[in-house]
Amino acid sequence: MKCPFCGFIEDKVIDSREREDGFQIRRRRECLRCNKRFTTYEEIEEKILMVVKSDGRREKFSKEKIFTGIQKACEKRPISTEQISEIVDKVKMEMNQKFENEISSKVIGQLVMENLKILDEVAYVRFASVYRQFKDITEFKKEVEQILGDKNE
Amino acid sequence: MKCPFCGFIEDKVIDSREREDGFQIRRRRECLRCNKRFTTYEEIEEKILMVVKSDGRREKFSKEKIFTGIQKACEKRPISTEQISEIVDKVKMEMNQKFENEISSKVIGQLVMENLKILDEVAYVRFASVYRQFKDITEFKKEVEQILGDKNE
DNA sequence: AATTATAATACAATATATTGTGTGTGTAAA
DNA sequence: TTTACACACACAATATATTGTATTATAATT
């Protein structure tokens, strides 16, 4: 790794820590010529995932959008930011497992819903109402009865 | 490094290559649970350098801007893109050595000029004429005589 | 279509990074 | 202002990454 101070190509790692979330490694390096220190980060290469929206337009997949979508559904619910992040990461992982370069926004919505359902039913129903575009309250009713029904089996 | 497919936290590096320019290391990793492979990149953390312009406004330092500035000065000159990149990198390195978070655009100009002077005098004079805002051709004359004078010493 | 560059793959010999534990510091959040 | 959190620093014991060489695949460029 080229020293940002003197440009020398050799250095040694004097410390190396993985972030708790496991998505980054930080290394502290020292240049073998000028002895100055600098920090590097190792990250997973993100393949650019395209999301196909219902009208056919495509846009870059963004963790942030999913995050805010879930966040809205979780308003005033006992769900922490970390828990939302976990869902986002899980959804992303499932996407990596199952899909190539494109994924429809519908499928993303389903993945989010599956994960949200386990965590918080209120948030789940809220999210579903937005995602599946509930037209009137009977749809809420149906969805809730569905959930309750599943539990009694 | 967390597996992007299954989320497992352990993996092994099966290949590791440094880019020729020395600013990146690419690692090929394999998950110890699902055996899927993925790629990571290690890069130097970029500290955000602010450039103070002559009117006092600040903006983020950008390699691209310097690059295009030099490129203009090198029009029709026998200077390759790589050589320009090298100057940009050298300037950046000098900045890292000497400065903290802020640097005046004037000083950047000087650094560029120093490096350009060694490489190509025509480009240097062009760059200087823009950078130091030559008012008339006598300034070109002065600059050229200065260079020629330096050589005879 | 031909060319170039970059990435993925494999394998073997060698060198260097990683991880735990602990201290201190600066900065952002509560 | 007190509390967290992330980063810098140090050291020691252990495990794993790095680098050369080479072939093939894929994407980008002309």
Image (spheres, coloured by chain):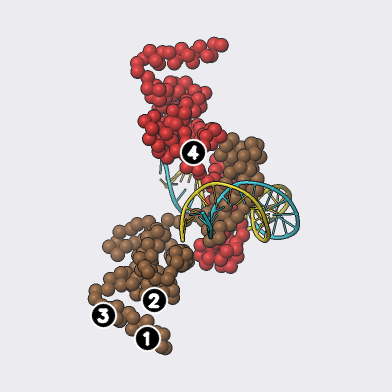
Chain colours: A brown, B red, C yellow, D cyan
Q: Position of residue B100 (x, y in %)?
A: 51, 37
The residue sitting at 46% across, 12% down in the picture is: B145
Relative vertical location of residue B22 with respect to residue B33 in this rendering, above or below: above
Relative depth, front residue between A21 and D18: A21
| Residue type beneath disc 2 | Glu
- Residue linked to disc 2: A121
| Residue type beneath disc 1 | Gly
Q: Could you tell me which secondary element the residue under label 3 belongs to?
A: helix
- Residue linked to disc 1: A149
Relative depth, front residue between B60 and B67: B60
**Do the residues under discs 3 and 1 have CB atoms within 8 angstroms?**
no
Instruction: Decide: few, some or many residues near mark 3? Use Cα within 10 Å; few <14, some 14-19, many ≥20.
Output: few
Q: How far, Cα to Cα, is label 2 from label 4? A: 48 Å
- Residue linked to disc 4: B101
Labels 4, 1: front one = 4
Residue A112 marker: none
- Residue linked to disc 3: A138
Q: How far, Cα to Cα, is label 3 from label 1? A: 16 Å
| Residue type beneath disc 3 | Thr
**Do the residues under discs 2 and 4 have CB atoms within 8 angstroms?**
no
